[in-house]
Image (tube, helix red, strand yellow):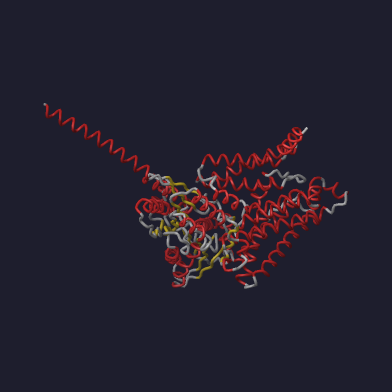
Amino acid sequence: MKLFKKTSLLLIATLVLTLIFGFGYQTTTLAENDYEFRVIVHLADDTFWIPAISGTEKAGESLGVDVSFTGPSTTEIGEHVSMIEDAIAADVDGIATSLPDASAFNDIVAEAREEGIPVVGINVDAPDSERMAYVGEQAVEAGRVLGENIVKHVGEGGQVAVGSSQPGQTSLEDRFAGAKEVMDENNIDYEFIDVTEDITTAVERFIDYYTANPNVDGFFGVGGLSTHASSSAVETLGLQGQVAAGGFDLLPETLTAIKNGYAQFTVDQVPFLQGYYAVNQLYLYNEYQILPVDINTSAGVVDESNVEEVIELSDDGYR
Amino acid sequence: MGNEDLLNKIKKIVTRQSFGVFIALIAIWIFFGVATDAFFSFNNLINVLRQSSVIGIITVAMTMLITSQEFDLSVGSMFALSGILFGVLTMTVGLNQWLAIIITFAFAILVGLVNGLITLKIGIPSFITTLGTMMLLRGAALVTSGGYPISGFRELSFINIVGGRFLGLPAMSIWFLLIAFAGYIIMNKTKLGYKMYATGGNTKAAELSGINTTKIKLIGFVLTSVAATIASFTSIGFLGMVSPTQGQGFELEVIAASVVGGTALFGGSSSMIGAFLGALIMGSIKNGLSIMGTSAYLQQAFIGLVVIVAVIINVQFQD
C-alpha cells in the first residue's frame, strides 16, 4: 500500500513536471518562432492567386508564423518595388516576391539581403537579382508542355492563334518560346496575338482572328486571361469540336470550359505550392540556416479526365 | 496689442486651407505610428517622401491646371510614353542621350499644346479631349515599344541626375521638392500664378481685365505634360527601366492628391503647400498600409475613403 502511494506520487510528480517542462518548452519555442513573413505579388487582386494565398496560410498555420499576402493591384513595377521597400522598413524576417521584370528588382532585392532579410522569388523569376532561390514553374519547359498539347489536339501541320495579355512579360514570353520549339518541330503554323488585359477585348481578338482565318484549328493562351478568352471565343463562335482551345492556369472559367468541352486542356503551375514552399523555405532559413533551393512547381495538365476533381479543389481554394 | 497681433497671426494660419491638410497628414502619421513600430523610423519617412514623388511631381503641375479650370487625364499615359520615347531613342536608335532628352521634352510640349489647342480652340471639354489623348498616348507607348519594357539605362550618365542619392535623399525626392518649391513660387509670387487664379476664378472677368486666358490655360497644359515627363525620368532613374503599361490610373491619383490638398475642382482656388501635403498624404497611406502588410484590396478601399472625406471637406470649404 505504501509502495502504491509512493509510486502514484512519483507518477503524478513526473506528469506535472512533464507538463510544466512541456508547456514551458512550447512557449519558448513559440516565442523564438515569432517570425513575420511577407509575400508580395504583382496583380495581387487577380483570382489566380487564391490558391497561392491558401498555400501561404496553410504553411503559416502549420509553422506557427505570421504571414501576410499583399501586392499592387496592377503590374506597376514602381509600386511593387515600393512594397518590398516597405517590407524591409517593417523589418520582416523574410520576403517572398514575384519578380516580373528582369532588372528592375535588382537594387531592392540587394537592399533586403544587405539588411539580412532572406528573399525568395516566386511565380516569375529574375535570375540576375540576388533572390536566394526561385519557387515556380520553369516557363520554357511549361511552354513545351503547352506545345505538346497543342500538337495533340490540332495535329501536325495545323494552324493556330496563341494569345498573350502582356507581350514582353518574361515568363509569358518564355512559355511562348517553349511552345514555339515544339510547334516548329511539328510544322504548326502559328500566329502570336496581343489580346490585351481586358477579357472582353481578348475574346474579340480571337473572334477577329477567326474572321480573317476561318481555317484555324485552335485558339490558345500563354496566360490565365488569354486561355479563358480562347475558350470563350470557341463558345461564342459555336466552334466546339472544330476549333481546339486551352493554355495555362486554373481559372474557374477555364475549368468549366474544359468540363463543357469548349476547351481541351490547361497547364497548371500550381500556385498553391508557390506560396506554400516559399514560406517554408523562409522559415527553414531563419530557423536552421537551410539555404532556399529552386523548386519547380510546374507543369501538370488538367483535361477532361481529371477536371471534375480539380473543380472541387478549386472551389475550396486549393487549386 | 502684441498679443492680439500674435493671436491674429495664429488665426490666419489655422483658418488657412493647407493647415487642415497638414492636420490630416499628422493624424494619419500618428495613426500609422501607433499601429506600426517601423513607420516613424528615419528610413521610412524618407521612403514616404520618395514614394510620394512621382505622383507629387505631376500633382504640382496638375494643381496649376485645375486652378485655371482645366483637367488633364493623359498624364498617366504620358508618364509611360515619354519614358518609352526616350528609351527607343537612346537604346534602339542609339541617339546621344542629351539630344534624346531634348527631343523627349519637345514632344512633351507638343502633347501639352495638342491637348490645350483641341480643348480651347475647338471648345471640347478638357475632360473629353484628354480622355482621348490618354488612350491615344497609351496605344502609342505600346506600339512604339512593341509592348516590351525597355531597360539598360544604368549605362547612361544622365542616370546620375535622376537616380541615386544626394545628401542621403533619393534623387526622385529632390526633384519633387524642387518642383514643389518652383510651383509655390509661380503660384504665389509671379504674374503667371495670379493670372491662373484669375482665369479659374472667373474667366470672363479675367478676359475683360486683359488676361489672355487661352494662353494661360495652354501654359497649364504644357506644364502638366512636361511634369509627367520629368516624373517618368525620375522613375527611370529609380528603376533603371520603363514599361509601356506604367502609370495606369495615375491621372486619378494625381487629381485626388490635388483635391485632398484643397484644390477646388471647379478652378480658381488652390494651395501649392496643400497640394504638396496632399501628395504626401496619398504616399503615407499607401506606405503605412503596406508596412502593416494589409491586403491590396484594403489599400484601395482606404485611399478611396480618404479621397471622399477630403472632397466633402473641400466642398464645404468652397461654400
Q: Position of residue A234 (x, y in %)?
A: 52, 58
Q: Is residue B103 above or below residue A51?
A: below
Number of callouts in the render? 0
Which of the image's four quarters has the N terminus of chain B?
top right
Q: Is residue A315 visible?
A: no
Side of B35 relative to A133 (left or right)? right
Q: Is residue B153 above or below residue B285?
A: below
Side of A235 relative to B250 (left or right)? left
Q: Position of residue A282 (x, y in %)?
A: 40, 52
Q: Nearer the viewer, residue B304 or B286?
A: B286
Which residue occupies the extreme top position in the image?
A1
Q: Is residue A15 above or below residue B184?
A: above
At 21% from the left edge and 31% from the top edge, which residue is drawn?
A12
Q: Could you say which quadrant of the image residue A20 lies in?
A: top left
Q: Position of residue B262 (x, y in %)?
A: 70, 43
Q: Position of residue A28 (x, y in %)?
A: 34, 41
Q: Is residue A253 visible?
A: yes
Which residue occupies the extreme front position in the image?
B2
Q: Nearer the viewer, residue B149 or B285?
A: B285
At 50% from the left edge and 65% from the top edge, which residue is drawn?
A173
Q: Could you say which quadrant of the image residue B163 lies in?
A: bottom right
Which of the image's four quarters has the C terminus of chain B?
top right
